[in-house]
Image (cartoon, rainbow, N blue to C red):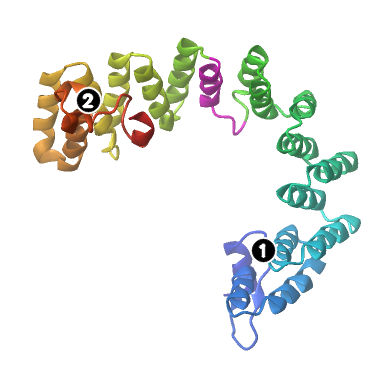
Amino acid sequence: MADSEYRMAVPGTRPYRAGMIDESVYPYDHVESLVEQGRPDDAIAFLEDRVRGGHWEDLDRLSDLLVEHGRADDAEAVWQTAIDSGVAHAHHGLAYMLARWGRFDEAVAVGRVALAAGEPRARVDLAILLCKAERIEESIVEYRAAVAEGDVAAGAALAKMYARNDQFEEAVQAYRAAIGAEGVARWPLGAIFEKFGHVDEAVAAYRAAVEAGENHVRDRLTRLLAAHGRLAEATVVVQAQVAEAGHNPSYQQLGWLLTEQRRFAELKAAAVALKETNPIARAYLIKGAHQSANLHDESEEGSARVVRQLPGRWDKAAT
């Protein structure tokens, strides 16, 4: 593969031509190969040669490798040298490495230097570091500043900080303002409402998210409805889900919901319809039905199968 072809295949990377072999090798594959051969010093030397080009990904891999092999001070020095050389995002690399080590005050200090230096997204990075340091009120200040500077999407993270700080109204207002910005999903607004016990508003927000195409939220919506005794509404959501291909496990929830409501005729009809067309879905349906107390007597054998909440991935927590 020619160098130009390599760059097209792996944007943002630089090829390494391996000795006598007339082909380009992805550099980090070469690094991993050296490490697997028990040659970490050679891998480090290889990356040290590459970082002279000032590529952030090389710095990141080199610092990780140094830390993995007990050279944390050298890793810190790598980032500091990059900062002194003006490498883009080097403050970010050093700050997050310090945060991973639990040195939060130092990480925040580096984040403030990055902000003063005008690094891109430095304010949001600083807000994240403050959150990691459990300095929530300071994080809120930085997220608010980011929003004021035009970063609308930062409002979503601001809302989560407000929620952590038990500021419900501010959280809702901030998240609503962020909806529509690139990368901001709708469903977390429902999670905020749910966290503070506003069930109807949470249901409405989750429904809006599903209508916007965030179909993974249907599970949250179903569980919330079922947990508050709104089984008929939960059933409608699950029926819409199983009508689409690839949702066989959701039949377990459908079986439980129908049986909990004693809708045995519908349960039987569904089982008959699935017998030939989708036996796997039928097995899930029957499993869910058997997890409802309405299909058992009071015997120990029967009650051992019963779950008191909507079954599925959280069966153990629901029993």
The C terminus, quarter of image: top left
- Amino acid type assigned to the residue bearing label 1 in the image: Thr
* Label placed on residue 228: none
Task: Tell me the crowding category of disc 2: few under 14, some 14 to 19, or many 20 or more residues within 10 angstroms, Cα based.
Answer: many
Residue at the location (82% across, 62% down)?
73
* Above-or-below relation of 144 to 19: above
Secondary structure, mark 2, is loop
- In the picture, measured across the screen, residue 294 lies left or right of residue 164, that is left
Residue at the location (79% across, 28% down)?
138
Task: Check disc 2 and report the residue beneath it.
Answer: 292
Task: Check disc 1 and report the residue beneath it.
Answer: 13
Residue 20 spot, x, y in % from top left: 62, 89
Residue at the location (10% across, 37% down)?
275
- Amino acid type assigned to the residue bearing label 2 in the image: Ser
**Residue farthest to the front, as pictured:** 300
Report the magenta stretch's main SS. helix
* Above-or-below relation of 307 to 170: below
